[in-house]
Image (cartoon, grey):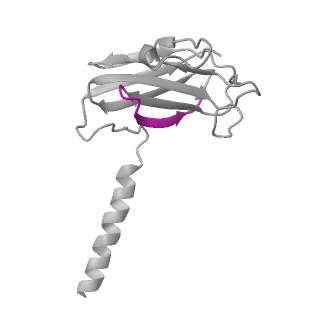
Amino acid sequence: MKVIIYILFIITAISSNKVFSQEENSIYYITDLRGDISLEMEINNLQSNNGPLYIRILDENENPVIVGTSPVINYSARISFDSISPGKYAIQFFHDENENQKMDFSLIGIPKEKFGSSNNIKPILGPPKFEKMLFSLTENKKVIMKPVN
């Protein structure tokens, strides 16, 4: 009898966890501190609605703290992250139109797909300088970016 009750308890706990975890809007936690800042991103002027947009948010030491995707609808993508701790961050993204889960380059190393970064930094003879992409996040913020390629 105790075994049956124990099994029923485990099944109930597992199934209730699945029900609660199926939220429509996901919350992405960056740190164990669970900060109280929200970052809303909008990326416009994409060439097509094909494939997802891959997004990376890096801390000031160039460590990725969030890696995610967003669908492209009406040639733009919108994504929000909650519970971010204050700090300096950089955003990088690319539009994976052919859905091969990587950024494609020509034979001479020029990106074939749309890409961009925070502060809308344009690359000059190579990728943009990381320091120029950094921005301070001390309160809720909305950033609007455009691809440079």
Between 14 and 146, the one nearer to me in the picture: 146
Residue 86, position in %: x, y?
Answer: 26, 25
Q: Residue furthest bottom?
A: 1
What's the residue at 34%, 57% (across, down)? 17
Residue 71 colored magenta?
yes
Q: Nearer the viewer, residue 137 or 18?
A: 137
Residue drawn at (51%, 15%) of the image: 145
x and y, in percent, of residue 141 in the image: 35, 17
- What's the magenta region? 60-72
Q: Quadrant of the C terminus?
A: top right
Q: Quadrant of the N terminus?
A: bottom left
Relative to 119, 109 lies left or right: right
* Image point (47%, 37%), residue name: 67
The tally of labels here is 0
Give coordinates of residue 147: x percent, y percent: 59, 17
Q: Is residue 117 magenta?
A: no
Residue 87 versus residue 26: which sits nearer the camera? 87
Residue 83 versus residue 4 in the image, above or below: above
Does 84 appear above or below 124? below
- Image quadrant assignment for residue 60: top left
Name the residue located 61 percent from the left edge and 33 percent from the top edge.
52
Return the residue found at the far right: 107
